[in-house]
Amino acid sequence: MVKRAFQTQFKRWDFPSKQNPAHKNPALVARLQQLWEQNYTQKGMVDSLQDEGYQINDRELIRLRLRLKLLLRESVPRPRRRQTDDGSTQKKPKRKKAKILPGKGLINQLGNAIVAESSGSSESSESSEDEEATYITIGSENAEDVQSTQPAPEPPSLDPEESLRRQLRQEQLQRESDEKWRTRKRRRRTRGWAGLPADTPGEPPRFPSETTIDEAKAYLGLDNSMYRRLRERFQEICEGEGVIKKTAAGPERWTQLVQQLIQEDAHLVSVFLQAEPEVFKQSNDALFRPKGQRALSIDVICMDVTKRLRTMETRMTLADAKNVLGLNPEQTRQVRAAYIAKLKTARFSNKYEAGEEQWTQLKTTWVNESEHLTRALAQGEADPGYARKLRAVEVIARDVMKRQQQDKLNKDPSKKKQLHQGPGPGPAPPVVAPQPERRRQSAINNLVMREHPGTVVLKVEGLVVYRHDQGEREVVVEVSDDEELAAYLGHVKSTGQGKATFVVQAAAMLDAGSS
C-alpha cells in the first residue's frame, strides 16, 4: 500500500517516468524516420540524434528501428551454430595452415605456389562459412523483420545463339588485348580482367611509372598497416599545404613534401639510407623525377594519394546515389532485388565481358520496369539533375554487379585467382605473382635470370623422387614447355612429394662458362 501511495503521489506531482521508452517520443520517431529516408547509417543516426539533444544510445536506437520496421540493408538473420547432443554450441576446430617456406629463392617460391594451390581452396571455403553478417537480437525478434537469404534457384542455361555471341566477344577481347600488348598500347595486367587472364608473371611494366601499388609496397617493405598510416599521413601533409597534384606543386615543393613524409617514418628512413640515400639531398630530381626503384615506389604511392584527393569531391558514393534518386533503404532493396533477378536470368557476368550494348540494354529494361527509378527519371533532360541521376543509376548497377561477383567467389573459392600474401594485398617479391591456374615455363626462366643477373637459361629439369623398399631414387625429367611443367607439378602433387625441385642449367651471357 505504501509503494502504491508513493506512485500515486509522484504521478500527481508530474514526476518524470522512470521508464521513458523512445517509441513514445513523437519528435524522436519523426526525426528518426527522416534520417532513415536519407539513408543514414546506424552510427550516423546515433551521432545526429545525440547532437540534436535526444537522449538515446546505440542499443535503444536499434530497438526503436526494429519496432518501426526501419531496417537497414546490412541487417540479415543470424546464422545458427551447430549444437551438440547436450544442447551446447559446438565450435569448429581450426585447420592448421600449410607452412610457408622462407626465403625468396627459385625453389622456395615455386614450392610455395604449390602449397598455396592445395590449401587455398579449403581455407577459403572455411572462412566463408565462419563469417557472420551483422545481426540484431531483441528478445525473440531477430529474423521475422528481415529478408530471407535462401539461395535462389539456378537460372536456365544460355541458348546457343547467346553462347556463340559471348564466345565471339571473348575472342574479340583476346585479339584486341594481344594487339594492344604487342604495340605497347595497354598497361600490364597483373590480375584477370573481363574473363581474360593476367599477363605472364614476371612481365615488367611498360614504363617505370606503371609500377603497381602492390609492387611499390613490396619494394618499400610495407605491410598493410604501415601502408595505411603512410597514406593517411601524406594526405594530412597535402591537405595542410593545399596540394592536390604533383605537377601543380612543382619540383621543389613536391620534393619537400615527400622528404617530410620519409623523415617522419623510421622505417622509410632506414630503407632509403641503405639503398637510395640521394633522396635526402637538396636536389629535386631524386624525388620529382625518380630513377631509383624505391624513390619511384614512394612517388607512385604519393601520386595515388593526390589523385584520391582530387576525386573525393566529385566521387559519388552509394548513399549519394540513393539520395539523388530519392530512394530510402526499403525502396533500394526492391530496386536492387529486381536488378539481381535480371542479372541471374541473363546469366550476366560483367560489363566488359558481355559488351557495352548488352549492359545498356539490361539497364534500360531494369529502369523501365522499376516504378521508383521511372519516377526519379520521369522529367528526362528537362530536369537539371538528370545527368547526375543517370550517374546514380550507374553507381547502383555497378555496385549490384560487384556484390554479385563477390558472392560467386564466396560460394566457389576455386575462382579466387589471387592469394593475398606477403607485404600488402599483393604477393611478394615485386613483379613475380604465382598463379596456379596459369603456370608458364618462361616464369622459371625469369626467376632464374632475376636471381642470377647476366645469365641465360639453357635447360630446366624437374626432380622426381621414387621411394621403394631399398630406399629412394632420384630421377630428373626435362621441363621444356608449359605442358611438361603442368605434368611435372601434377605428378609432384599427386605423389605427395611435398614440393617441386628444379635443376636449372644456366650460362653467363658474356662467356661460355656454365653456372
Image (spheres, rainbow, N blue to C red):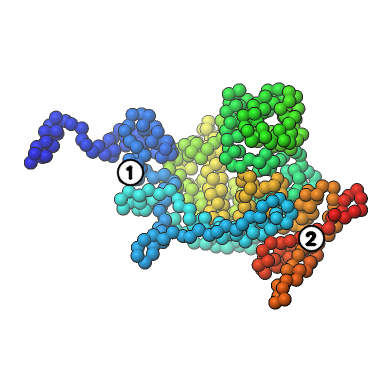
Q: Position of residue 207 (x, y in %)?
A: 76, 39
Q: Which mark is residue 503?
A: 2
Residue 210 appears in which quarter of the rendering? top right
Q: Position of residue 274 (x, y in %)?
A: 72, 35
Q: Position of residue 449 (x, y in %)?
A: 80, 50
| Residue neighbourhood size for the residue with mark 2, other residues' Cα within 10 Å, grouped as few (<14), some (14–19), many (≥20) | some
Q: Residue at x 35, y 41 (%)?
A: 59
Query: Mark 2, mark 1: which one is toward the viewer?
Result: 2
Q: Residue at x 79, y 66 (%)?
A: 476
| Residue neighbourhood size for the residue with mark 1, other residues' Cα within 10 Å, grouped as few (<14), some (14–19), many (≥20) | some
- Number of numbered callouts drawn: 2
For this orientation, the residue located farthest to the front is 470
Q: Is residue 512 left or right of residue 395?
A: right
- The quadrant of the image that shows the C terminus is bottom right
Q: Nearer the viewer, residue 253 or 399?
A: 253
Sequence-first tag of 2 and 1: 1
Q: Residue at x 31, y 45 (%)?
A: 67
Q: Which mark is residue 63?
A: 1
Whether residue 169 is visible here, answered yes or no, is: no
Element marked by disc 2: strand
**Label 1 amino acid?**
Arg
- The quadrant of the image that shows the N terminus is top left
Q: Residue at x 59, y 46 (%)?
A: 360
Whether residue 151 is visible here, answered yes or no, is: yes
Q: Position of residue 96 (x, y in %)?
A: 55, 59
Residue 505 appears in which quarter of the rendering? bottom right
**Label 2 amino acid?**
Val
Q: Gap between marks 2 and 1, in whole Å? A: 66 Å
Q: Is residue 510 left or right of residue 355?
A: right
Q: Is residue 269 left or right of residue 143?
A: right
Element marked by disc 1: helix
